[in-house]
Amino acid sequence: MVKLASTLTKLPFTHGIESEIQIVNLKGRWIDGEKMVSIMGKIVQDVAEGLKGILRDPQDELTEMISKKTSNIRIAPVERRGDTLIVTYTLSNGEQVDIEILGRDPHIGTITWILEAATPPCTTLEELAWWMHTILKLSHDSLPAGVKFITTGLNPLMEYQQGLSFGDHHHIGVPDPGYRLSVYNLIRAFIPHLVALSVNSPFVAGRPTDIVTMKDGRLQAPGCIRSIRLQLNARQLGPDDPQHYIPHLTSLDESFFERVVGRTPARMCDMYPFTRFNTVEIRVFDSQISVIRKVALAALLQALALKAKKLHDSGELIPEVDSETLIKNRRSAIRWGLTGPFFKPRNLDEFARKHPNFAAFYFFDCRLGGKEPVKRIVDAVKNMFFFLKEELEELGILKSEFLNPLLVSVYGDMSGKIIPPMTTADYQLEKYFELGESIESLSRELQIIADQTCSNVWSDPLSGIPNLQELVAVPVSLELSFEPSIVFEGQSVTCKIFVENKGEEPLRDLNLSCVVIDHAGEEVLEELFTLETLEPGERRYGEIEFDTEAGVPQYTLSAKLTVSSELVAVEKLAIPVYRVVCKTDLIAQVDGVIVTGETEIPFIVAVENTTPQDMYLTLKISVVDKDQGRELDSVLSDLKPWGVYLKPIRAKDHALFVAMSEEIAKLDWAKAVLEGQTEGSWVEIDPLVLKPWLYSSWISPRCAIRAQLLDSSGHVISESWSRDFRVFFQGAMVSVEVGQKPKSTYNVGETLETSLMVDASDLLSPSPVKVVVKIKSPSDETFERKIFEASVKPGVSTTMPVKWTIPRDILGKGAGEGVFYLTVEVLHDGELVNLVEAPAKFKV
């Protein structure tokens, strides 16, 4: 982290963090006692040497500034801690203080798995982040092989032991008693909000406290406690009792504080404003999953402290939020994090009359104009950010990386990857589900996260650019739309992206990035629009178009707008793709149909409108020869009385069409099949009919019933097929016989003579058939030569002479051994409908 002194984020009060880190083996479990003592001793020694080296030769201005404030780096024994790393630090007033930077936790017995790292009192966020990250990085680098850090409130694999939990304690240095009283009272009022933001211990003894599931990409774990540490560690926190919770103070009366909480000394509580360092100590946080989250909470606490200072300077007292309400909301935050309910006090009306400004931000939803009470903790936290907006901007942290992790948890990120609200406890529960509910795999994941935060100060599992459009007014709007309003598979979709300058100044250098992805996350289309200037009140739009595909239920359009390289707006639009469900099948349980005359094919078609609006549809039902891809018979609903049932078919409604003749309907098997395939009422329609007017008996095509739904433009929006069945046509409608048989042998130049008797008297088609005679070779299937062609009109029976003089080239390549035979093909509209092969062969 390289920062110039002029760009440092100065804090209104000094700030220090004590962070408790757990040391585990690769399996995530505790390490044997003697080995643990040895590891901690080595860490303290290595960090001392590493810190001396860094400060002896600073590589940037920030480190150089810190080196000037740091002296006398040493290791000394401390009661209950053993060997401890201590530095002498110079405060801004010139006073020097000794700070115990690193050692084992002093509140546990001789063997502990808690490594406690502490920063000096810092005056900037950069200084605070430098110390916390440097200590943890050097400690991490010192770990022997097979040993890891985990940064959570409890060890997820181990049983809970009294006092063996891991927290972050923050010290805000407030020497002035009046300011300290105001800072304490204001932060006390927001304890539930701070707990909800920081819950980070959802596992104990190898499991969560309830089942974990996911639905539509969202965590479903209402029975899982988000901070088991706060739930179980009642002796060192709380007290979790309205009668004894840390009180609102009218003066810094330590004896009164002790009497209320019922503890002496009273430091082991959520907050304590009576430290010997003149700090307000906040002890309620679980150990945070990353360095930057620890610093983000410090930044938020400093904003609260600055707000308290301003209220004090203006003579405005901090309103008292009663302990009963605080305890209810604290318990809600412990159990559900940001998703928990937010409770209002019994005397809300009276509180609002006495403190209208504070009540508007604390108990009433700012997003709803302050007219409705806040119902969820996440909305109460959003109110808190509104309440502190001026202070966050004054400190320069509202849009800085220091506060990003907390803002992403509350508002989500600009990419839409993180769906709020999302605490790191929620993240762990989701990851646990993704890892097949393997707590060992989760422990390994947490070890990797600890590795990353020790390596990179900005690393956090919920990282990203927060989407602050709720909190920060953006002078430009981004709107998305698509046409048609109802999209079907295979249709083309046109998306419009509107950009409007709602500010009073021109916007320059605008870049609009648009990406369409499918339900599997695959990119379908990407477009980039650029605009040099957008004047106040000006509205522009761009268009993109793509085709939907079968089997894709939804697409998502994402648009990102940057102005002068700053990301200012992100919008997403889901584009659902509908199918009007159409299902068809044969009613008869048959594998084949014999066609002698006009033969009915009974079937059933079910149509369901799954879309959210009425649809005007056309149903086309066909019996199709799947071998040749031709329709043998079809019907359109628009031409039938029953078509009214589809003009329109109502949203979420269905229609059932049954085609069965009266004769078939009387049969017992047909009744049974019909009852088995239908529910409720249906519409009776005429069956499809097959006629043997073209096919010969040698052809038995593979057929099926096809049902197609067409929209008002004639586009097929749904199609279904019945199971296949064979159709056997008896009797040829165009018969062919070969008259005179060829001789057994011919010489080149001789004439082959024969005759054809063609009978098309039963042909009902209006178009003629074509008769083609070919010579083929039995030894070479690829060889054929056409020797005769003629047309025969429907209703005609005729005899046609065939004469062919045998050419010399007949014995060329492909003729095999010079043995041939005759074939006669009958074609109708280019399709083969009859084939006759002469049995006699001849040689040339």
Image (spheres, grey):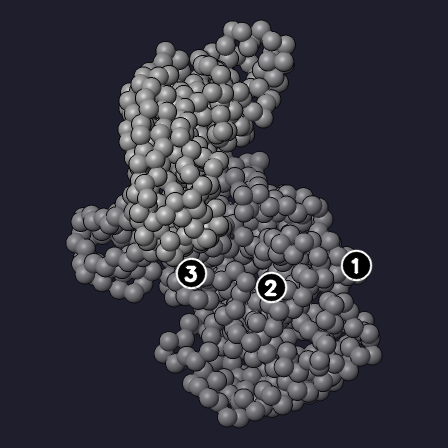
Q: Left or right: 665 with respect to 559?
A: right
* Mark 2 element type: loop
Q: Left or right: 813 with respect to 519?
A: left
* Mark carried by residue 465: 3
N-terminal label among 2 and 1 = 1
Q: Which quadrant of the structure image shows residue 643?
A: top left
* Mark 3 element type: loop
Q: Is residue 802 above or below residue 69?
A: above
* Mark 1 element type: loop
N-terminal label among 2 and 3 = 2
State if disc 3 and disc 1 touch (CB < 8 Å): no
The residue at the point 59 percent across, 56 percent down is 427
Q: Is residue 312 above or below residue 80?
A: above
Q: Nearer the viewer, residue 65 or 597?
A: 597
The residue at the point 35 percent across, 39 percent down is 752
Residue 166 rendering spot, x and y as whole percentages: 68, 65
Q: Nearer the viewer, residue 24 or 783?
A: 783
Residue 129 rendering spot, x and y as whole percentages: 51, 74
Q: Left or right: 280 with respect to 496?
A: right
Residue 76 rendering spot, x and y as whole percentages: 71, 87
Residue ID for mark 1:
159
Label 3: few (<14), some or many (≥20) within 10 Å? many
| Residue type of the residue flagged with mark 3 | Ile
